[in-house]
Amino acid sequence: MAVLTSNIDTGSETFRRNAEDFESRRDAVERARQAAVAGGGDRAHRKHAERGKLTARQRISRLLDPGTAFLEIGQLAAHDVYDQPVPSAALVTGIGVVAGRLVTVFANDATVKGGTYFPLGVRKHLRAQEIARENGLPCVYLVDSGGVYLPLQEDLFPGEHHLGRIFRNIAEMSGAGIPQIAAVMGSCTAGGAYIPTMCDEAVIVRGTGTVFLGGPQLVKAATGEVVDAETLGGADLHTRVSGVADHFAEDDEHALDLVREIVSRHPAPPVTEPPVPPQEPLYDPAELPGIVSAGLREHIPAREILARLLDASEFSEYRARYGTTIVCGTGRIGGFPVGVVINDGILFPDSSLKAANFVELCVQRDIPLLFLHNINGFMVGSQYEAEGIAKHGAKLVNAVSTARVAKFSIVIGGSYGAGNFAMCGRSMGPRLMAMWPSGSSTVVGAEQTATVMALIRKDQLAKQGRTLTAEEEQAIRQPIVEAYEKQSQPAYFGARLWVDAVIDPVETRDWMTLSLAMAAGSPKQETRFGVFRM
C-alpha cells in the first residue's frame, strides 16, 4: 500500500477558521448529548437510588466487560421532538462486550417518564434489534418500563412497525439461534411483559422487578380484587410459582452477574480479533476539525481525511487517475481491512462508474465498505444528461443497494439528494450510519431550494405580466433557508434516528474498529446485483 502524505498547514488562517467553526457545531451536538445522558435529572436519579436501583447507564456500565467500549445507538433520539423532554427516548441501546462476546443491549431508562415507550422509543428499539439480527448479536434486555405512553397510543400500537414488532423480532431471532436474554429490574407491565416472557432466559430482581399483564390498579378496576405489585407479579411468585422467570436476583448487581453468566455459556462466538495488529495513523485525527471546511460549498480534501483515519496512513487507491471526483481504495482501520469510498467533488459519469466497479470488487473479495459523504449530488446539465448521467448514477445506486458485504456510512460534510443514495445513505441499508458535527443533509441544499422556489414564482408572475419584487423574493427564500438549515443539522438527524450516532472525528477510528469487528463475526450473505443499464 502507498503511504498518504499531508500538505495541510495547521498554522494557517483556513485551518484555524475551520477548527473554530467546527467547535461551534460540536458545542450544539454536545448540548444535546449532555441532555440525553442526564436522563430524568438529579431528582429522578435520587429517587431511583433510594429504591435500591441503578440507572440505565449504570446498569450497562456494570454489565459490560471492564475497559471495553460501548457503541451507543440513538443517543440523541427524541431530542427536542416532543412537547416535553424525553431524553434518549427513555431507552439506552448499543453494542458492547459482555463475557468476551459482542451483544446488543437495551436498557429502559425509568428516570424518564417511567421508562415508557414513546414512538421514537419503539423505533429506536426496533433499529437496535435490526442491527442485532443483521450481525447475529445476542440481545440483552434490561427491562424497567411502564409500557406504552398511552396518550400517543395510535403511533405506538396498531401498525406493522409499532410495539408488537419488538415481540415478533424476539421470537424470530430466538428461532434463528440468536440468544435473547432479559433481566426484569423494574416494572414490566402489559405488552411490555412479553419481552422477558418471550426471551430464552429471564432474570428478575427481588423487591423491584415485577411482571404482569395488568397492574394492581387495572386488576382492581376490572375485577375488584385488591392486590399489591409484589404479590401480583414479583420475583418470588415468578421464580417459585408461575415459572415466568428463570433466575431470582437479590438486587441489580446480582441480576447483572447472572446475565453475564448466561451470556458466557451461550455458543455466541467471542469478539473477532483483527487479522493484523492495529497501527495509529501517521497524522493526528485531532487535526480533522481544522481540515473539514467551514463552508459546505468548500472542498474537503479526501486524502487528508484518510491520512488521519487509516492505519499507518496506508491506502491502496483504485483508478487514481480516472473519475477523480471520487476516491476509492482499500486500507485498514484497527487492523481490519476496509474499502473506502469518499467524495472529492461532484459525481460525474466516470466517477459513478468507478465507484460502482469498486463496490463490485469489494463484494467479490468480501471486504466491508466505508462511505464518507461530502457530496452535493450528480452533475446536471444537457451535456451530462446526453452522456447518460442518470443511468451511470443508477449503476452506482444499484451496486450500493444490493452489495451484501457490511456497509458503513459517515456524513462528514454535505450529503444531498441522490448523492446521499449513491453514498449509501440510510435508505440504502448501511449496517451503521453516523454523522460528524460538521455534517449536513437535505434533499437539496437550502440556497438551491430557495432559488428554485423563487424562480418558479417568477415564472408564474411573468405569465400574469407581473414581476417579483425583492421583498417578495426574500419572503419566499427566508423561511425555506431557515427550515432547511434547521432540518439539516446532525442533532436534528440524530433526534429522529435518521442516523445511528453523531460522533466526533477523533472517535471515528474507535467507532469503526468496533463496527468492523462486529461485521467480521457476522453471518455472510450472498450478493445478487440488479440489472445494470448499459
Image (cartoon, rainbow, N blue to C red):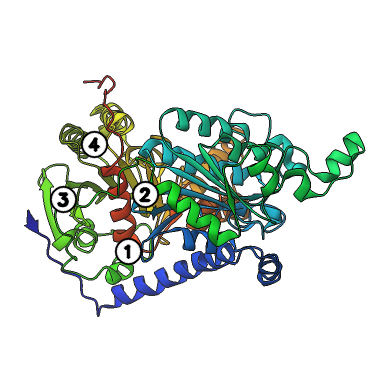
The residue indicated by pointer 4 is 352
Q: Earlier in the sequence, mark 2 or mark 4?
A: 2
The residue indicated by pointer 1 is 292
Quadrant location, the C terminus: top left
Q: Earlier in the sequence, mark 3 or mark 2?
A: 2
Q: Earlier in the sequence, mark 4 or mark 3?
A: 3
Kindly state the secondary structure of the residue where label 3 is placed.
loop
**Gap in angstroms between the C-alphas marked 2 and 1:** 33 Å
Viewer-nearest of discs 3 and 1: 3
- Circles 2 and 4: CB distance less than 8 Å? no
Q: Residues within 10 Å of mark 1 (few under 14, many from 20)?
A: many
The picture places residue 433, in percent across and down from the top left corner, at 39, 47
Kindly state the secondary structure of the residue where label 1 is placed.
loop
Query: Quick check: 450 left or right of 508?
Result: right
Q: Residue furthest left?
A: 2
The residue indicated by pointer 2 is 102
User: What is the number of the mark on residue 441?
Assistant: none
Kindly state the secondary structure of the residue where label 2 is placed.
strand
The kind of residue tagged 4 is Ser
The picture places residue 207, in percent across and down from the top left corner, at 70, 56
The picture places residue 186, in percent across and down from the top left corner, at 66, 53
Q: Nearer the viewer, residue 5 or 40?
A: 40
**Gap in angstroms between the C-alphas marked 4 and 3:** 31 Å
Task: State the residue at coordinates (85%, 39%).
Answer: 219
